[in-house]
Image (tube, helix red, strand yellow):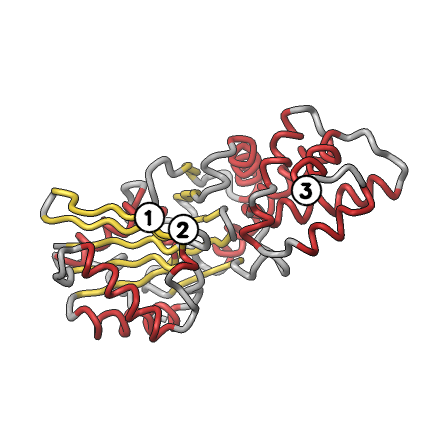
Amino acid sequence: MIAGVDIGGTKTRIMAYLGERMIADEVLVTESWRIRQMETDATTLAGIVTNLCGGVAPAALAVGAHGCDTGEQCLHFQALLAARTGGAVQVVNDAELMVPAAGHVDGIGVVSGTGSIAVARTADGKMLAAGGWGWILGDEGSAPALVREAAKAIRHSLDRGQQGDPLIAALMRELNTDDQTKLGILLNETRGAAVWGRYANAVFDAAIAGSVLANRVIREGGAGLAALVELLIERGANPALVVAGGGVISEQPMLMTAFVEAMAKVSPSSQVLLLREPPVLGAVALARRLLVGQGLSSQIGAI
């Protein structure tokens, strides 16, 4: 029996298989079980997975974890889970699920959802990551960052006395106000990545309605994601394949188009794919490799 887990910033999805037969497919709100204390989280997750597997710990468990942004963090959580399940365990960043979920072994994974990050491995298995700093400092191209940049664009527009861009009305509708001066106050009162992320539809709706501001925000968001990939390539990541996924970029073609256009400038030779499968399938693929003695790379444990 094997299990794969995708721990995202908002949702956690777990799949378990007995041979080729799927025996469990569960989606949980991440905050309902994860408290960001690794020991406790490992105990809780091991229990959840074991229960889904009929009370038996899986022989191989692979986990892609949002927030495991260094090799050391991945190895630490991996060791904690292994101690609690007794089976083979592999923990990677959730962005590292993109490439195996797309059916490939090596490449750069990019997530654009509640947060954003780009992750790859060097030839010797060392983890390379760029981004993942959270929506206050960065997370370019993520849902809350798009809202943040949209609000800044609106602020500059209003300061110039320009009030006609559709983005202004769209964000005001999301915040349920007709008072432009309250945009900042309302955003501050609802401050949080998941909450702000839910307002991101306003940006895309406005862009479809012809908003110059929203289209610029989306274009710059795609460029921000490509800049993360560029940093990894400069640090030694293989540029041949880039796989993007996550709740925003997979659901919003305009952001994917902006990313592809920016990648054409950053790394013209890269093949850029949009992941159309659930990222958790990448964890399932890793668990299958783990079961037969293969890892994400031959040196997955390298830090």
Mark 3 and mark 1: Cα distance apart in space: 28 Å
For this view, does 2 lie left or right of residue 169? Answer: left
Report which residue position mark 1 lands on.
27
Give the residue type that dot 2 points to: Lys
Could you give the CA–CA distance between mark 3 and mark 2, rounded to whole angstroms? 23 Å
In the image, is residue 134 above or below residue 167? below
Label 1, residues with CA under 10 Å away: few <14, some 14-19, many ≥20: few
CB under 8 Å between discs 2 and 1: yes
The residue indicated by pointer 3 is: 175
- Residue 297 figure quarter: bottom left
Q: Residue at x 51, y 50 (%)?
A: 114
**Crowd class of label 3 (few under 14; some 14 to 19; many from 20; radius 10 Å):** some
Q: Position of residue 217 (x, y in %)?
A: 67, 40
Circle 2 sits on which residue? 11
First in sequence: mark 3 vs mark 2: 2
Say what amino acid the circle numbered 1 marks. Answer: Val
Q: Is residue 190 left or right of residue 244?
A: right
- Name the quadrant of the C terminus: bottom left
Taking the spot 64% from the left edge, 45% from the top edge, the residue there is 147
Q: Secondary structure at mark 2?
A: strand
Q: Secondary structure at mark 1?
A: strand
Q: Amino acid at mark 3?
A: Leu
Mark 3 or mark 1: which comes first in sequence? Answer: 1
Q: Does residue 77 lie above or below 24 as drawn?
A: below
